[in-house]
Amino acid sequence: MEEIGDDLEVTKGSLYYYFRSKQDLLYFCQKSSLRRLLEEAERTTRSTQPVTMQLYELIVSQIRCMLDELQGFTAHAEFRALPEDQLQEIIQKRDQYEAVLRGLVEKGMEEEIFLPGNPRIVVWAILGAINWTVQWYTPTGPLSAQEIGHEFALFLVRGLTRVVHLGSLPARTQVDPAYSLKDVSQPEG
């Protein structure tokens, strides 16, 4: 609570004017971020972009939401401290978001754009990688949340994608301008 108060430039006591407890604050943060992620998921999946770009955009937006909007709020991953009624609501929304990601992975596998595999495990791996960023991210580091999101999304989507479909992904950021997706999209030999 002190860290949150410091970030907002208010006293810890002032936060309790708006939130009765730490659990209420955690619930508010969880609910707000999940609302935002579900809105982005709906917008993205309505697009006519290839499934690779839809998944790419959702990964980037989730990382931006967690690291920029929630400023790497580690409590994002600590939602199990919520009271049972709030916990069930948050779990339902998390499951809803996970289902959107799983739907994209399933679609990509059915269309033979993504390599075959277990979509549930693939999505858990993606979410595990994304959620761990709050443990090491620092806003004063060399990369912005947007750049980290871009790099994560490229890495994760590329890992799922059959070589012939890689061309629909954007190029890497200026972090390494010599690198190009064309380098990995052409089979060797």
Image (cartoon, helix red, strand yellow):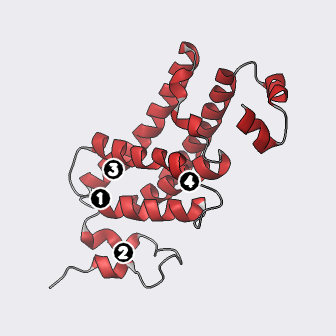
Q: Is residue 71 left or right of residue 129?
A: right
- Gap between marks 1 and 3, in whole Å? 9 Å
Residue that lies at the very extreme toward the left in this rendered image: 189
Viewport quadrant of the N terminus = top right
Reading the image, the residue beneath label 4 is: 137
Q: Nearer the viewer, residue 189 or 12?
A: 12
Residue lying at 53% horizontally and 49% vertically, measured from the top left = 62
- Mark toward the start of the polypeptide (2 vs 4): 4
- The kind of residue on which mark 1 rests is Leu
Measured in 3D between alpha carbons, the distance from the residue under mark 4 to the one under mark 3, in whole angstroms, is 27 Å
Identify residue for label 1: 160
Q: What residue does disc 2 label?
A: 167
State the SS at label 2. Answer: helix
Q: Which is nearer the eye, 13 or 123?
A: 13
User: Tag 2 or tag 1, which sits nearer the N-term?
Assistant: 1
Q: Secondary structure at mark 3?
A: helix
First in sequence: mark 4 vs mark 3: 3
